Amino acid sequence: MFVWLDRLPLSLFLVLALTLGLAPFMPEPHIWEKLKMLAAGDLVRPIDIFDLLMHGIPWLLLFAKLGRMVVATRQHRA
């Protein structure tokens, strides 16, 4: 199901997470702002939820790629 994730290089996911995931960088990364809003219970407007998704997806893809790499390494060693 996630074979496409295995085929793409890790560097692509790193670049996506560090650019799109953190943009805009000033005054603070957007993802950090939205996560603080989520923790405070202030994430109620649809545009804010959409923003969280758009800035969070690169990070989720990076973590998924890293997780699949760890699993593949453990299976290879066994």
Image (cartoon, rainbow, N blue to C red):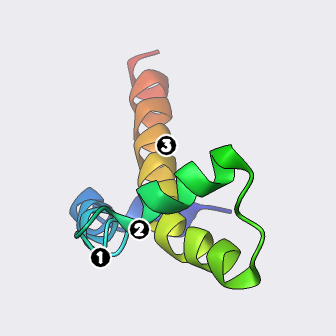
The alpha-carbon separation of the residues under discs 1 and 2 comes to 6 Å
What numbered label is drawn on residue 30? 2
Left or right, residue 64 beside residue 45: left
Q: What residue appears at the point 49 percent right and 26 percent down from the top-left corner?
A: 75
Tell me where residue 46 appears, x and y as whole percent.
Answer: 75, 82
Residue displayed at 57% across by 77% down: 51
Q: Which mark is residue 24?
A: 1
**Left or right of 13, for residue 50:** right
Residue 1, placed above or below residue 53 = above
- Label 2 Cα neighbours within 10 Å, binned few <14 / some 14-19 / many ≥20: many
Q: Is residue 42 left or right of residue 77?
A: right
Residue at (25, 67) in percent of width and height: 27
Upstream in sequence: badge 1 or badge 3: 1
Kind of residue at badge 1: Pro
Q: Earlier in the sequence, mark 2 or mark 3?
A: 2
Q: Position of residue 64 (x, y in %)?
A: 51, 50
What separation in Å lies between label 2 and label 3 (alpha carbons)? 27 Å
Q: Residue at x 64, y 75 (%)?
A: 48
Write down the residue under mark 3: 68
